[in-house]
Image (cartoon, helix red, strand yellow):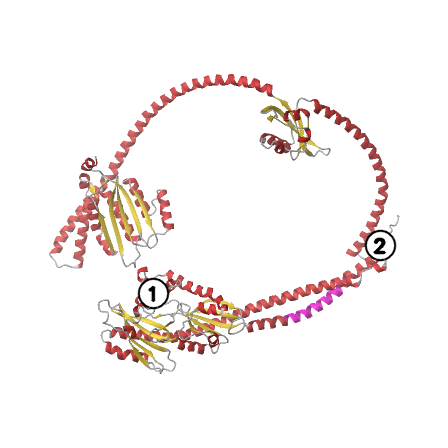
């Protein structure tokens, strides 16, 4: 075996230790260890911070509950005092002298921590006697003594009954207080909030009793409550006006004694508090959503509330709705957010927003987050230190194992290859049975393969020389075949061309160039779309695609647009063109001229058309005779079927309609006679409740007899005003039981087609449906308006109620039942009866809270005198 000489490797070309495997393993281990330690510390810091954040939230929640419970206890005392004042004012409404003595005694509690700055009794103004009941109001002066003032009784001051602290009490119960937002009193000049309780005498609103609490006292109360807190408290009323601020913030703000700032002003002064605006908006939205769940008052009642700006009117409505229901029963934690760099704490802070029951104050508990970050960093630092020690020890052990298992054998193989010592590779292959032994064997096998390839190169050169001789013979034969093909293309009278797979011409004969009027160089390498952009050739493209897909020849007739103008028909055979490897590389085509054949075909088609025209004329004559006989036979059969159907309908109507009204009329008449006898006996006895019920029932049955009198309705036509008169009197007990007031309007005498009992079945069911489904049980006023008008040739009857109405989903479902001719619901059954029995129409319009409007169209019955008048 010839030994393969490997190139010499000089010692100065060896890589330094920095490029060795040992150094690379160390750098990789250091990089992996750094990633593991950093990610572990980051995960631990995140987990610890989240856990501490939850603990801080729980502390804020607990402290907020404690603060609000203390506030609820204090405000509850003042609410009880205001309720007591309202009770006293109701008892001594006509004794103002007694009130002059009792009210100051109730207001002067003689307690050091008392927050009351004033209060009084405010009678409801009387439009007939405007000076009959003056207001009684006391306030504390600078010496903390109660002083009575009567400025509100003069016209110079805004009337107190238009104030925001007074008007909502008209809707409140007697034992519920309304807490006003912060405002500056125009007479005493004190910034305060007012707890107002309505004064009611025999369930009638006659005024309000108020307790005024100054913001200075509220601010001091919150300062005492926040002493044990590491942060501070901000209190807002329901209109986001500031009730209390910590002393540190008050010193930083340009506040004036006459100013009542709100949260918007505080956010503009200190932009860091702008982050609280969305959370406060969530509080207002929660109050409004709760009020919409169970509304207590109507829109007419809520119109007495004061009109406010900044979209606060809906919020005041919601408070008036929620307070009598006792919502919320406990303090609600609405939201918790983080502030970046709090202006008072000078660090990040957590803000928990609570909604206080009764007063609807918003309590903001602010605590610092510095301890949170400090604890998280300490835990992450300790864990990181121990992780570094553990990773260094693990990296050292891993390096020693890698050096013994991987680095030393690889270095030995590299040194053997550099020294060209193939015997050492053979020894290493026999010694080791692992991957390194296989690697040494692979190197030896590769050397043997290289020697074998060197020997085969000599044999390859000899074979190539012989191949060149064969190629020269093949080229000579190719030249001969090319000359033959050129002669065929030049002198053939048929069109011949070839295209590649992209549709570009690769070969064309002279005849094809002559017909197209183009040179060969203009056609080769171009597609039909490029050469003839204005000519559509979809048939040609379809045939070429078919040959490419099936790989089989295909023949068909195709038109060819020649350069003289017009087209000429050719019978074209297309076939697949393959290369020396039998791979498809194009499509060939040979076409034969069919112009002579087409001329003969036209002559024959003209003769055939004449014969077909004569045949069609004969067929039309026969068809007309058959149709005339068929029409006559069908008319006779149709007349027999119509007569039979008419007799069946008449018999069915007689069997269905006649017994029902006569039977009902007989029963009602018999019951009416019995009730008349009973009524005559009742008149001889003293009147009692049961007697009135019997008489009322007898009256109702008389009207029912008038509605069902079959003999009368057969003789006299049905007049709708008289019909509704009897129907409403018949249903009067049910209408009175549901407290429904009916308005009936009829401008003229209208006669409806149909029988009285049919209209009774229609309108009695419709009115019953309105009584049971249209109104709410607690609706104070229930109205039903019935209007009859004439829309020739129909009568329009409109029934409109002021009930709860239907929404769009209910209306859509009802109209789908009408389209299906369904009778599942009561309204669907009524419409079906109206359409099938009385040939009328029914429509309904409704909206939630606005009632329903039902419109019926009934065919009008024209009397002889009306027909003459119309004529």
Viewed as shown, does residue 354 lie left or right of 108?
right
CB-based contact (under 8 Å), mark 2 and mark 1: no
Residue 306 is labelled as: 1
Image location (x, y in percent) of residue 217: 40, 77
- According to the image, label 2 marks what residue? 426
Q: Is residue 570 above or below residue 79?
A: above
- Badge 1 crowding class, 10 Å Cα cut-off, few under 14, some 14 to 19, many 20 or more, is some
Say which residue appears at 65% left-offset and 31% top-offset: 551
Q: Of all residues shown, which one is farthest toward the right? A: 2
Viewed as shown, does residue 450 lie left or right of 188?
right
| Quadrant holding the C terminus | top left
Q: Of all residues shown, which one is farthest toward the left? A: 684
Viewed as shown, does residue 562 lie left or right of 673?
right
Residue 740 visible in image? yes
Q: Is residue 815 above or below residue 189?
A: above
Q: Secondary structure at mark 1?
A: loop
From which residue to which does the magenta span run?
383-402
Q: Secondary structure at mark 2?
A: helix
Residue 434 visible in image? no
Image location (x, y in percent) of residue 585: 68, 34
Q: Nearer the viewer, residue 77 or 424?
A: 77
The majority secondary structure of the magenta stretch comes to helix
Q: Nearer the viewer, residue 90 or 809?
A: 90
Q: Is residue 679 magenta?
A: no
The answer for how far apart the CA atoms under marks 2 and 1 are is 105 Å
Q: Is residue 395 magenta?
A: yes
- Badge 2 crowding class, 10 Å Cα cut-off, few under 14, some 14 to 19, many 20 or more, is some
């Amino acid at each position: 075996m010839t030994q393969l000489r490997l190139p010499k490797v000089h010692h100065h070309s060896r890589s330094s230790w920095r490029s060795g495997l040992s150094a690379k393993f160390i750098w990789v281990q250091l990089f992996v260890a750094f990633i593991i330690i950093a990610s572990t510390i980051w995960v631990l810091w995140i987990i610890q911070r989240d856990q501490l954040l939850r603990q801080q939230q729980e502390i804020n929640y607990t402290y907020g509950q404690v603060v609000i419970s203390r506030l609820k206890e204090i405000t509850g005392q003042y609410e009880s005092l205001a309720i007591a004042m309202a009770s006293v004012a109701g008892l001594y409404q006509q004794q103002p002298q007694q009130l002059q003595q009792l009210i100051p005694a109730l207001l002067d509690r003689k307690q050091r921590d008392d927050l009351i700055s004033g209060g009084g009794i405010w009678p409801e103004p009387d439009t007939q006697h405007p000076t009959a009941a003056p207001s009684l109001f006391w306030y504390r002066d600078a010496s903390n003594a109660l002083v009575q003032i009567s400025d509100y009784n003069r016209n110079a001051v805004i009337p107190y009954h238009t104030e925001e602290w007074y008007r909502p009490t008209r809707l409140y119960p007697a034992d519920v207080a309304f807490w006003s937002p912060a405002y500056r009193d125009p007479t005493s000049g004190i910034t305060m909030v007012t707890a107002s309780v309505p004064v009611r005498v025999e369930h009638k609103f006659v005024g309000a009793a108020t307790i005024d609490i100054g913001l200075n006292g509220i601010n001091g109360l919150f300062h005492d409550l926040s002493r044990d807190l590491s942060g501070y408290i901000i209190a807002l009323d329901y209109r986001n006006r500031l009730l209390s601020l910590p002393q540190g913030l008050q010193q930083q703000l340009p506040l004036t004694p006459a100013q009542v700032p709100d949260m918007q002003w505080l956010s503009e002064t200190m932009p860091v508090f702008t982050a609280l605006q969305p959370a406060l908006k969530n509080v207002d939205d929660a109050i409004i959503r709760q009020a919409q769940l169970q509304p207590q008052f109507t829109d007419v009642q809520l119109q007495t509330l004061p009109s406010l700006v900044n979209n606060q009117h809906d919020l005041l409505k919601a408070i008036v709705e929620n307070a009598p229901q006792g919502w919320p029963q406990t303090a609600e934690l609405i939201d918790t957010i983080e502030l970046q760099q709090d202006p008072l704490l000078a660090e990040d802070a957590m803000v928990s927003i609570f909604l206080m029951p009764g007063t609807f104050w918003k309590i903001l508990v602010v605590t610092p987050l510095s301890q949170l970050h400090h604890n998280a960093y300490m835990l992450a630092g300790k864990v990181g230190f121990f992780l570094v020690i553990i990773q260094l020890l693990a990296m050292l052990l891993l390096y020693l194992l890698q050096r013994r298992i991987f680095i030393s054998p690889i270095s030995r193989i590299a040194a053997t290859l550099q020294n060209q010592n193939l015997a050492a590779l053979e020894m290493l292959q026999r010694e080791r049975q692992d991957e390194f032994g296989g690697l040494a064997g692979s190197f030896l096998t590769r050397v043997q393969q290289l020697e074998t390839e060197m020997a085969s190169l000599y044999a390859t050169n000899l074979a190539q020389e012989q191949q060149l001789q064969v190629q020269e013979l093949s080229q000579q034969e190719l030249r001969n075949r090319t000359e033959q093909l050129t002669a065929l293309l030049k002198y053939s009278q048929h069109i011949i061309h070839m295209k590649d797979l992209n549709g570009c011409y690769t070969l064309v004969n002279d005849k094809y160039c002559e017909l197209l009027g183009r040179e060969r160089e203009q056609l080769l390498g171009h597609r039909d779309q490029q050469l003839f952009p204005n000519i559509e050739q979809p048939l040609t493209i379809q045939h070429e695609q078919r040959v490419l897909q099936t790989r089989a020849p295909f023949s068909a007739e195709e038109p060819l647009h020649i350069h003289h103008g017009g087209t000429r028909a050719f019978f074209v055979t297309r076939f697949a063109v393959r290369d020396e490897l039998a791979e498809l590389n194009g499509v060939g085509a040979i076409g034969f001229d069919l112009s002579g054949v087409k001329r003969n075909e036209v002559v024959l088609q003209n003769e055939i058309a004449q014969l077909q025209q004569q045949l069609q004329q004969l067929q039309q004559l026969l068809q007309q005779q058959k149709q005339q006989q068929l029409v006559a036979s069908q008319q006779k059969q149709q007349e027999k079927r119509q007569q039979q159907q008419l007799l069946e309908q008449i018999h069915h109507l007689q069997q269905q309609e006649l017994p029902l009204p006569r039977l009902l009329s007989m029963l009602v008449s018999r019951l009416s006679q019995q009730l008349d006898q009973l009524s005559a006996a009742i008149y001889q006895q003293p009147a009692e409740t049961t007697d009135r019920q019997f008489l009322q029932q007898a009256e109702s049955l008389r009207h029912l007899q008038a509605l069902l009198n079959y003999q009368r309705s057969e003789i006299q036509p049905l007049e709708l005003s008289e019909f509704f008169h009897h129907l409403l009197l018949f249903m009067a007990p049910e209408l009175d039981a549901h407290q429904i007031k009916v308005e009936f309007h009829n401008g003229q005498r209208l006669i409806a087609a149909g029988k009285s009992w049919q209209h009774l079945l229609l309108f009695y069911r419709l009115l019953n449906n309105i009584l049971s489904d249209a109104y709410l049980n607690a609706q104070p006023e229930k109205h039903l308006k019935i209007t009859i008008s004439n829309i020739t040739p129909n009568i329009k009857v409109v029934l409109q109620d002021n009930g709860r109405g239907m929404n769009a989903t209910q209306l859509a479902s009802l109209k789908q039942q009408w389209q299906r001719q369904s009778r599942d619901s009561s309204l669907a059954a009524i419409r079906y009866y109206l359409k099938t029995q009385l040939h009328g129409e029914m429509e309904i319009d409704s909206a939630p809270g606005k009632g329903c409007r039902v419109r019926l169209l009934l065919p009008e019955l024209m009397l002889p005198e009306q027909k003459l008048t119309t004529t």
